[in-house]
Amino acid sequence: MARARDYSPFLAILLEREGEQGAGTLADPPLISADLGTGKALRLARRRLALQVAIGDLSGMFDLSAVTHRLTNFADLALDQAIHTAILERTPGAAPKGFVAIALGKQGSRELNYSSDIDPIFLFDPRTLPTRHNEEPVDAAVRIGRRVIELLQARDADGYVLRVDLRLRPTPEVTPIAVPVDAAIVYYESQALPWERAAFIRARPAAGDLALGQSFLDAIRPFIWRRSLDFGAIGEIVEITRRIRDHHSQGQTFGPGYDLKRGRGGIREVEFFAQIHQLIHGGRDPALRIGDTRSALAALAAAGRIDPAEARALTDAYVALRTAEHRVQMIDDRQTHSLPTGEALDRVARLDGREDGAALLAHLLPHVTRVAEIFDRLAAPGAAALSTDPDKLCGQLADAGFGDTEVALARIRSWRAGRYPALRSAAAQTALEAVLPGLIGALAEAPEPEAALNRLDRLFERLPSAVNIFRLLEARPALAVLLVQLLSHAPTLADELARRPDLLDGLIDASAFEPVPDIAELAAEMRVRRGSDYQAQLDHVRRIVADRRFALGAQIIAGASDPLAVAAGYSRVAEAAIDVLAQAAVDEFARPHGLVPESEFVILALGRLGGGALTHASDLDLVYLFTGDFAAESDGPKPLGATLYYNRLAQRVSAALSVPTAAGPLYPIDTRLRPSGNQGPLVVNFESFARYQRESAWTWEHMALTRARPVFGSPAARAALQAIISDVLAGNRPERDIVGDALKMRAEMATHKPPAGPLDAKLLPGGLVDLEFAVHVRQLQTHRGFDPHLGRAIEALDLAPSLGPAHDLLTRMIVTLRLVAPDATQPDMPATRALIARALRLDDWPAVVAALDSARQEVTAAWKGVTDGHVARRDGDRT
């Protein structure tokens, strides 16, 4: 209190008015008298709060969090009381609904300054806002907003409550001070600027109709936290800091007069550092969506997104700078952020308990220096620009490692000339120049630089716009190396990238190379928010699936994952998509037709999906079923008989899973494994399915059933279907010549579907098909070893121990070749052959050839062992 009296005129006045007891116990916030009128009561409470917080802060009894939380809590309370008063003054007795203040800035993050203004956005709902007779809701909302500002900003002998700044609302130069909530949603969905998305990291409903405010934030969340981020937003935020540094140049140099907020190494740079990384990673990691700066830094460090030592340094600096800022503001209760000069600086230092201004500067200097160093790396200049002079450029290309510099020179000159539409805008040309040095460096490291350069050229030719992909590469230079790898080795992924360049966004951090989550988590990611329409759900799932599949493919190209794990990941993604889209189709179909009582739709997966081992190019083998009586009828406005109902629903489900939308295609669907194949109905009930399998199904259908797995339906329905399958496989089926039927079917396959090339690990003799036949025949013969996963089934049967490794090698090969050699021929580039060898866990290409030959021999022997008895009997019959 002595320091407050001696060095702060403002606090001295408060102590004189309130007395030493005015600070209270420091444990509780000051009371707001209900009988003084809202404005006066809030002004008196704010005065007492200012004294209480200052004494608690100066004494060390309040840390920075206690200070900012008390200030923010009071601001929330004052704003809420002002809104309620403004509404009730105009419409006595009305419920204070339909008007909300969204807190942004430091109020939103609960980090208010000692003498800070607040930056709310006033929103209203015309349907629920109380209005006077014949009054338009927008007029009522504006009048309420004006009264709120008057209550908070009016000054008298007791001071004021809060300064209010409404300039962060959408297009403040043309919009009223209170904006209809639906108009605000449309604005943030379609027109918001990058800095506005960053501002909403700290947004929260603070006062008024909090439910209305939360529904607004829920609606715009996908547009703030984007999985696919425009990296121009990051560049713009960094550029804002550059402009702030330039505009406030007089406060950039550390010393007396230094701007604690905007100066180089100041508070704003700590905040922006956290926000930039939150924008990059928060779209995929909800745990990073934190308003409070220090908590955000801790979460980013815990998630491995920033260096923990840098997070600690920034946190320590933030505390030191904010504390100094509060001392400056306590002097005269002014919203200032700059250190004073001369004797005034000494007063600030002594208020803080330090000897003089020099001691305060010495305390702050290491923090400012460290923040500046860390933040400067975000805006570090890139590699030296490529010359526009042909001779100098040829020299640069040669230095980079290009053998044929003329080819590279011609390509670069054509890009600079805007040869393709994606490169013709001024923004595209600027972005191109920024990334060219890094791209050329990455291309020079490619196994065949000229070939990679040509593929990059074809990518540019097909892009609708190149700006975003250039900005992404500028923000994450290491992605250029991965991009060149994809272009060099994976034509499948390169083609997808040309159609959707934003797929590269999903590779911006290490999380893209982690195993995909479980099905439940994936499904939660794929579901859109409540209230979205059916088409939005279809598009959303297609985007998520494309991102996930592309990232899984990139894992193989980068050597980050075992192709067996990638195959399992492909399957989990597909199963989650089935779960979400089938349910969406069921819900959409039920609107006009209702549901069939005591009945439900069930999906059975077979083939590679049933076995949980898809490739990048796999289709989905599905059988559609339903429980209950086929003679039942749905209960909707337009009822249908159960059989017609489910057949139409199944068509809707197939379309949801396969038809291309604006977001692209999804999966090819194959339903030919249903009872009676293409000749039978698309959907049958459990009873018909069981009867068909037990009485009429052919051997090949029972072989397919060994990899069957329910993937959609209630747990009870899945269990009931699995019981039917287990009963059939255990022997409740027609007697068939299993081996003879299998031999005949395999011969027909060899005739009508020959191997695509010399590396077709699926269809070559001794390939995966022969392995599957050997396993399924043995399962049906012995009535055991049933497991949809082929590797586990092999372990459960009395087949050769070497068959398991053969299965793993053939599976790794087919999963990898679908990406790098879809024609199943030997790649021309040695580096691609080396990539295949690495994926197969082998040393080199000769080892690949030898391992493939050995695996095929093992499979051929196993197939021969399963069929030899039948062949001998057949030959004996002929004799």
Image (tube, rainbow, N blue to C red):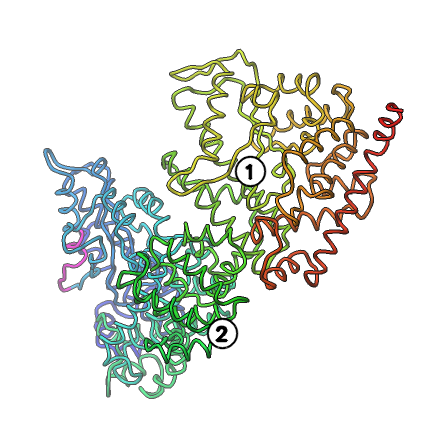
> Label 1 amino acid?
Asp
* Crowd tier of the residue under label 1, counting other residues whose Cα lies within 10 Å: few below 14, some 14–19, many 20 or above: some
Using the numbered discs, state the Cα–Cα distance from disc 2 to disc 1 in whole angstroms.
Answer: 42 Å
Which amino acid, by three-letter code, is at mark 2? Gly
The tag on residue 403 is 2
- Closer to the N terminus: mark 2 or mark 1? 2
**Magenta stretch encompasses residue 852:** no
Q: Which residues are magenta?
A: 148-157
Instruction: Locate residue 382 relative to residue 772 in the image: left or right.
Output: left
The residue wearing badge 1 is 619
**Label of residue 568 in the image:** none
- Image height of 32 relative to 862, above or below: below
Instruction: Determine the image quadrant of residue 173.
Output: bottom left
Q: Is residue 155 magenta?
A: yes
- Quadrant of the rendered image containing residue 693: top right
Count every numbered label the image shows and give the total. Answer: 2
The answer to whether the residue labelled 2 contacts the one labelled 1, judged by CB atoms less than 8 Å apart, is: no
User: Mostly what secondary structure, the magenta segment?
Assistant: helix
Residue 167, image quadrant: bottom left
* Residue 275 pos. (x, y %): 38, 63
| Residue 748 percent location from the top left of the image | 68, 31
Q: Nearer the viewer, residue 289 or 229?
A: 229
Pinpoint residue 462: horizontal percent, then vertical percent: 38, 53
Q: Position of residue 798 (x, y in %)?
A: 83, 39
Asked whether 172 or 490 is in front, the reply is: 490
Q: Is residue 39 above or below residue 350?
A: above
Q: Residue at the location (28% across, 63% down)?
A: 427
Q: Would you say residue 6 is visible in this rendering?
A: no
